[in-house]
Structure formats: C-alpha cells, structure tokens
Image (tube, rainbow, N blue to C red):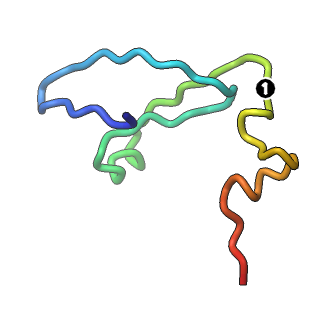
Amino acid sequence: MQTVSVAPGGATMVEFKVDYPGKYALVDHALSRATKGLIGILEVDGKADDSIILDKSGDSRKQLGEMKH
C-alpha cells in the first residue's frame, strides 16, 4: 500500500522499510500544498545496493520501461 487515508483532524502511524538510500518526499493528496511548504523529506542513509533497481543486464532504463519508437 502506498497511501493511508486519514480523516480531517485525524492522525495515523505507519511502519515501513526503505530498501535504498535517498531522499523521499512525504506529501498529502493535495499536491498544491507542497508548494506552500506542506511537505516532509525522509532522508535515508546507508549502503546503496544497485541490484534491487537494476535489471539483470545492469541497465536501469529497461527496468523503468524505456520508450521504443
């Protein structure tokens, strides 16, 4: 699941695992509020394991679905 419904005035707690270091944005459904500062950045440190994002040939473009013309 990538989203959690939280009623107005409500709160929630989630637990999740991040498998790759980087900066991850946390925003609500109204993305326009992010431009006003309503955004959280989760910064994850650790050793990068490229095997989880690269395909077997080592070309991440195939993993992302490179467009063919």
Q: Residue at x 79, y 27 (%)?
A: 49
Residue 31, percent from left and from top: 36, 50
Picture layout, residue 20 above or below residue 25: above
Q: Which residue in the rendered view is the most extreme toward the bottom?
A: 69
* Residue placed under numbered mark 1 in the picture: 48
For residue 39, which quarter of the picture?
Answer: top left
Picture layout, residue 66 above or below residue 47: below
Residue 6, percent from left and from top: 19, 30
- Which one is nearer the viewer's eye here, 55 or 30? 55
Query: How many residues crowd around disc 1 within 10 Å: few (fewer than 14), some, or many (20 or more)?
Result: few
Picture layout, residue 29 above or below residue 19: below
Q: Report the amino acid beneath label 1.
A: Ala
Q: Is 51 displayed left or right of 57 in the figure?
A: left
Residue 33, percent from left and from top: 33, 47
Q: Residue at x 67, y 56 (%)?
A: 64
The residue tagged with tag 1: helix, strand or loop? loop
- Which one is nearer the viewer's eye here, 53 or 38? 53
- Which one is nearer the viewer's eye here, 64 or 31? 64
Q: Residue at x 39, y 39 (%)?
A: 27
- Count of all numbered marks drawn on residues in the image: 1
Q: Is residue 38 visible?
A: no
Q: Quadrant of the N terminus?
A: top left
Q: Quadrant of the C terminus?
A: bottom right
Residue 41, percent from left and from top: 52, 30
Q: Is 19 displayed left or right of 52 in the figure?
A: left
Q: Residue at x 78, y 46 (%)?
A: 55
